[in-house]
Image (spheres, helix red, strand yellow):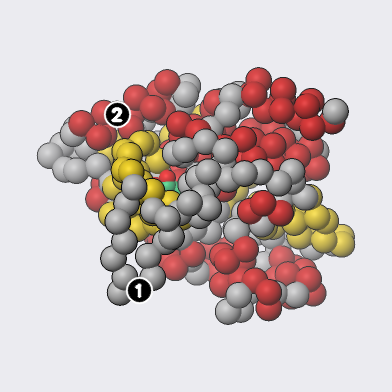
């Protein structure tokens, strides 16, 4: 079982020609509400691709919460342990998506902040059943820290997506099996201003210093690289796509990766599956609504082989 602990957001997406600059006001050409949240997205991606997924997160009893629960349930995620706190609003993410498919996001955490260490402990039994646990940073820091401790106690492999990177402290990274940042997040982890300053040598030293099993850095349309302590860095390019909306692309990649790893395939195979899955996702609008099924990924993969 793959245990996902994290955020569940209602995404309010605005289509704009260009992302607004500081101090600038721009007019949207369209607006849409759709299910998102890094935790829920990763859970839905994995479940649609065949993973056996249980989600821990927190919502309320409002209309948005009901529709977020429905999206996860329809994808096959076990939502029976999700905490419902009455009388609150569901978390919301305000997203601007440019004509090139790039985005920027502001999240109002609301009930995501009620994913507390105490709540996680109530479901300690799930850690005994899980093979992988997926974590991100849209829930309280102390909860992520506690979940990592429980994973270590029960021998659950951790897949950590350090996003949003602002709240991450490197103490969380020690002995984590798989860390999956994007290039900006990787740069921040290494104390660099931008990814162009990051050297291969520094990456290798970083994973060695924290005893990270593997760091997979996603590079958008360029695929990803894989940094491991004892071998040269490997590059996994992907097929370039016409991106319509990149919201949830990293979550799709991660969900696909963990699904295949939980099936005990090699890291190479899991990455190539994940590259294909996220490549499909960026060609559609939204996050969870854009995520592919297993069959779609397999068909697309066969097509790419010619
Ligand atoms: O990773 C994409 C997600 O980030 C969006 O769905 C939004 O909810 C934010 O959490």
What is the quadrant of residue 26 in the picture? Answer: bottom left
Q: Give the CA separation, mark 1 to mark 2.
A: 33 Å
Residue that mark 1 sits on: 22
Specify whether tag 2 is near ligand 1 (CB below 8 Å). no
Residue 79: numbered disc: none
Left-right relation of 211 to 166: right
> What's the residue at 31%, 38% (across, down)?
33
27 and 191: which is toward the camera: 27
13 and 133: which is toward the camera: 13
Left-right relation of 165 to 183: left
> What's the residue at 41%, 28% (across, down)?
72
Tag 2 secondary structure: helix
Residue 248, percent across and down?
50, 44
What is the quadrant of residue 286 in the picture? Answer: top left
Residue 130, percent across and down?
56, 34
Q: In the rendered structure, are the residues bearing label 1 and label 2 in contact, judged by CB atoms less than 8 Å apart?
A: no
134 and 268: which is toward the camera: 268
Extreme residue in the left direction: 87
Residue that mark 2 sits on: 67
> What's the residue at 64%, 24% (across, down)?
296
Say few, some or many: other residues with alpha carbon within 10 Å of mark 2 (under 14 / 14 to 19 / 20 or more): some
When the figure is inspected, residue 170 is found, relative to residue 123, above or below; the finding is below
When the figure is inspected, residue 112 is found, relative to residue 279, above or below; the finding is below
Residue 30, percent across and down?
33, 43
What is the quadrant of residue 5 in the picture? Answer: top left
Residue 99, percent across and down?
48, 51
Tell me which numbered mark, 1 or 2, is placed earlier along the sequence.
1
């Amino acid at each position: 079982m793959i245990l996902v602990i994290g955020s569940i957001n209602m995404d309010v997406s605005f289509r704009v020609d260009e992302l607004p600059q500081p101090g600038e006001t721009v007019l949207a050409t369209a607006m849409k509400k759709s299910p998102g949240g890094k935790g829920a997205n990763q859970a839905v991606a994995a479940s649609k691709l065949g993973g056996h997924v249980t989600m821990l997160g927190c919502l309320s009893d409002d209309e948005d919460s009901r529709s977020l629960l429905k999206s996860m349930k329809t994808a096959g995620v076990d939502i029976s342990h999700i905490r419902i706190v009455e009388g609150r609003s569901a978390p919301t993410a305000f997203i601007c998506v440019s004509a090139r498919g790039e985005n920027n996001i502001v999240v109002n955490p609301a009930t995501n902040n009620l994913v507390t260490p105490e709540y996680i402990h109530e479901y300690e039994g799930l850690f005994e059943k899980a093979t992988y646990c997926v974590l991100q940073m849209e829930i309280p820091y102390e909860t992520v820290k506690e979940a990592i401790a429980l994973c270590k106690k029960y021998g659950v492999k951790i897949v950590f997506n350090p996003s949003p990177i602002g709240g991450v402290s490197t103490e969380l990274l020690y002995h984590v099996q798989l860390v999956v940042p994007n290039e900006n997040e990787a740069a921040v982890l290494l104390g660099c201003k931008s990814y162009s300053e990051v050297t291969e040598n520094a990456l290798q030293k970083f994973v060695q210093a924290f005893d990270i099993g593997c760091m997979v850095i996603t590079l958008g349309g360029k695929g990803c690289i894989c940094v491991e302590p004892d071998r040269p860095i490997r590059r996994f390019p992907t097929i370039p796509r016409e991106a319509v909306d990149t919201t949830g692309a990293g979550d799709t990649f991660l969900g696909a990766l963990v699904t295949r790893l939980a099936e005990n395939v090699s890291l190479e195979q899991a990455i190539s599956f994940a590259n294909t899955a996220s490549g499909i996702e960026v060609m559609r609008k939204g996050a969870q609504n854009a995520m592919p099924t297993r069959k779609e990924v397999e068909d697309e993969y066969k097509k790419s082989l010619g």
